Image (cartoon, rainbow, N blue to C red):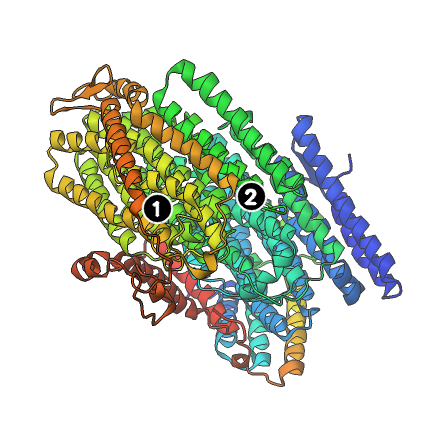
Amino acid sequence: MVGPIYIIAIALGTAFSLGFFKNANRNISFSLMFLAMAFLTFISGQWLYAFLTQQQETIQIFTAGFKPPFSISLQMGFHEAVFLTMINSLGLLSAIYLFDHLREKGVNMMMVFMLLFMGLNVVVMTRDIFNLFVFLEISSIALVGLIILEKKQDAISSGFKYLIASGVISGILLIGIVATYYYSGSLYINDLISANLSLVKGGSVAVFLIMIAVILELKPFPANGWALDVYQSVNAGIGPIISGGIATASLFILYKLLPIGGDAWLLPIGITGVISFLGSNFLGIKQKSSNRILAYSSISQVGLLMIIMSLSTSLGDKFEFVFFSVLISQYLAKAGLFWIAGIINKDEIDDWNILKKSPGLIVLVGIFMFTLLGLPPFPAFYGKWELIMNLSQSGNFVWVGIILLGSLFEAIYLLRWFGKILIKQDNLEDLKIKFHKLIPVIFVSFAILLFSYLTAKWSGLIGIKYYIPFIIALLIFAFDFLPVFIKNIAAISTVAWYSYVLIYQTYIPENDILRIVFGSIFLIGAIIMLIPGFTFKGKRQGFYPLVILMFSGLAGLIEARTTFQFFFAWEIMTLASYLLIIRGKNAVKPSFNYILFSMAGAFTMFAGFGLAFAETGSISLNALADVLVYANWAYALIAIGFLVKIAAFGVHIWLPSSYAEADDDVTSMISAILIKSGVFGLIILMLSMSLKNAVSPNIPYVLGWIGAIGALIGNMMAIYQEDVKKLIAYSSIGIMGYILFALSMMSHMGWLTAFTYSIVHFLYKGLLFLAIAGVIYRTQTRNIYEMGGLIKRMPLSFISVLIGIITLAGMPPLAGFAGKWMFYNAVIMKGWYLQGAIVFFSGIVAFLYCFKLIHNIFLGPLKDNHRKLKEASIWWLIPQFILIIGIMVISVYPKIVVEPIGQYLSMYFPNDGLVWDGTTASTRLGYWDATKIMTVFAGMFGVLFIILYSMSRKTQLVEQFNIVFQGERPERPETTHYAHNMYAPYNKALGFLTAPFITSAWKFVYESIHSISDQVRKFYTGNGQTYAMHIIIYVVVFYLFINGGF
Amino acid sequence: MENITLQNISLAIGILVILIGLWGLLTQKNLIKIVIGFALFDTGIHIVMVSIGYIKNRTAPIIDSAVDMNNASNLVVDPIPQALVLTAIVIGLGITALMLSYVLKMYQKKKSLDITNYKDLKW
């Protein structure tokens, strides 16, 4: 094997020999440099390989023939090999990326580049603290040397700030080193560790100086203005070198020197990390420059790594895993984003929509951002999970809160940025991409995928089958050039196969009713909702991989046996649905709302799972029932996550516009299927709650009120909508309110209602959205006042909507009434009369918007431009009629669905169930026979139909423009519709209920955060001296903190 | 009076020079003066380093006629800090030179030596 000492020899030799080339032939000098960098990578890589495979022992290399402390020694161990491989391969990729830049600037830049990486290599390997100082200085000088060659005024002045700051820091480090030497008589790091200097009088100051200098090298918030300016101004090819090379090496210094400080330093470093993570992410949300955002994000990630390092003892054997998974994510994703920023060459994130023309790069940006955010399946997800679980277990709940809050801030700025890329704009300039700049970007994206797999495997939290959906999604992505028709068939058959395996082969034999019901809603629903995809022409690039991921996320929820698996699937489903919604025409803003609320909800759920784990020590979902001490907190936190997904009152504001702006078939999927994931989650959670008495009855009580108010507000809002998709969206909020209310009654009948409503809502909401989507597809408008009289043009859609609203309104004889009847029983048995009254009232309100759907769209006069309209496409109608069949079956024989659910629920709520006698169901309050009702209705309907039909010969058909029947004097376009603003009188009476005060409240929170962030960041004045002052103040405050000055 | 030894005097002077340098670095608006401040700061550190290695009544760590090779470790001051200082001086020189070349570049671009004119990037 090639000895590590050759790293220095080769790097140094190359740097010097480059000088001979002058600028004679830059191709040769670049090749030389590139070869040297490749050789460095090879050496470190081969050591890493040896450590991984051959049980290689850590080796020490002694220079000058003496043993330390009389000579400088280098160490090559497993950790060194990992860090060196990371740093050197980054150097290699950076060289490729900077190919034309390096050639343009000539050999000077190449020399400095080599010296920088040599410095970083030695910094990692050396065991001599003064040697460490020297090579740290060499790296800094080399970096500043790279900056001065930029010749941009911004870069030069920020380089000067960097010099001042790093000069002060290295001065502190130098004094610290000499003082340590004074007290210990050695410069050998191993000697310093064993000397236990903190216990020596005066020695603790020496240790303090070294530790604080090392911390400052990590650019902790807020003493880091100098680093931010450099990040922002340098060439995008140098950004990764700072964030992936220098920061990585600095972290290793901290890791190496931490034992000198001893355990007493763990807490201060953790606190530094917490402040850095929260502060940087908080200030990041007001940034507009892409490089500066990346700078804030880099610093926050380093903060997170410091937190992890401070927990090294309590994390135990998981430390390496957690640290590495976060480090590798930050390292790869940050490099990728910096490089793409360089390709785009636009500083403002508003200009990033230039990427629209290269969708491949958008996919890469997405991968990098989601990696940074620690979303599954990317490496940091596993690390963050273990971190939060560990922090919870050791009782550090405040830290958990801060980390999750910081992550939310990070999500705000990264996802807003992602949204900006997708904003549509005409006349975009062409993006010229140089091939050599693309190579490293593609390389790191593949590395991310590889490490996602490796960390997942290493974590041992999930099995191999969790990768199958990703493989299928990648496969479909690879065949994205195929037409929609083929991909749709492939998607449907995949889902069909999976639902066969999951429902028919697994859960039906187990008779797990909960999972059969929701599995069917999720997967059979998916098949039905995919059918309209056949109407789309072209390729629909990117749609099918996301659909597959979303439904596999939903299936994952069903299959989950541990909280980790559940959270994994939950995040996959959320992320995929976000990406599906954002594909809509004007969906950037609504989808941003959706993902922010979802992320916040997911984080509270995460915290809740952490609490549960802290108490039970198990991540099994069943163990949720064993939580006692933290029960109320844990359940409430987890519930919030689900409430966001079902758009419960208070966190509902993301829903209407997201539904409205998503593509039409996506709306059907999310409204009929996806929203049930929240219901499923609540059921899982509340089943745990039902199993014991320790949980406070207040939680279901509060949930009940939230549900009742949500039902009222959702329905009230729905009746005034003129946008038909928004109308149905608000109605979803209302129905979800019913379901939440029903669940929170925590009784047999309540839950039976919730299950029935879930199934029925899936059927009619899918039906309504599909029918309306078919109408929108033909009329090309979502405004109700631009429709009307469509009954003759689209009679089949009319029938669908009619059946849909009869079901929705809960009128007999259709299935909605079954739900309503049970619901009334449940409320009366529970005795929640006030809330119940609100819910009953909102049921009446629902009639109003139901009527509006049928009356305004299908009845009345036809619009002129709709005269030649055709019936909706057959692909929209097929799924509608499948759903109608479903509704009819349940309407006539509710027993086939309701009875098994009742039996299942008896395990949890043995009392007050339904008693079945043939087709008659009865409770202690009364009875109901759906089949008989249906027969009576069918008979009455038949009689009436015959009477009316026989009278129809007397009907006089009037032309539309016969003004005897139509008197209108239109003022504005919408007023030409005879039923525009039809419920205005109600609005006058009850308008206060629909004032958008929840929206205003959230807007206020959002804007306050932004304006505070804007004010706080002003302490970064841009003056190099102020930045140096920050460093001095930081040191003083830190010293006082350590020594109990506070 | 016992404390007023050569070592302590040089230590005190070193710390004083560090503080003067730091003061210059943090308060002067002129770029050249800032660089001078840094140089002083650096020099102060070097004085501190040398004074830490000093041992009373001993001579320079050079083996010649005045120092017997067999008994050298009892006759000379600690050579390590002196060796470190040499390296530190070289590094300090490098940084100072780099700072001056930055000042030159900055002046060429903006024709100003006032650091308050270089705040284009902030927040």
Whether callout 1 and callout 2 share a subunit is answered: yes
Q: Sequence order check: which comes first, mark 1 or mark 2?
A: 1
Of the pair A410 and A223, the residue shown nearer to us: A410
Disc 1 residue type?
Answer: Gly
Of the pair B64 and A45, the residue shown nearer to us: A45
Mark 2 crowdedness (10 Å alpha carbons): few <14, some 14-19, many ≥20? some
Of the pair A1023 and A900, the residue shown nearer to us: A900
Quarter of the picture holding the C terminus of chain A = bottom left
Mark 2 lies on a secondary structure that is helix
The residues bearing labels 1 and 2 have C-alpha atoms spaced at a distance of: 47 Å
Residue A1024 appearing in the image: yes
Q: Kindly identify the residue that appears in the image at 67 percent across and 70 percent down.
A: B98
Horizontal arrangement in the rendering, residue A214 relative to residue A964 (left or right): right
| Residue sticking out furthest to the right | A24
Residue A206 appearing in the image: no
Residue A642 found in image quarter: top left
Residue A294, image x, y percentages: 54, 58
Q: Chain of mark 1?
A: A
Mark 1 crowdedness (10 Å alpha carbons): few <14, some 14-19, many ≥20? some
Residue A1004, image x, y percentages: 31, 62
Mark 1 lies on a secondary structure that is helix
Residue at label 1? A401
Residue at label 2? A535
| Labels in figure, total | 2
Horizontal arrangement in the rendering, residue A377 relative to residue A281 (left or right): right
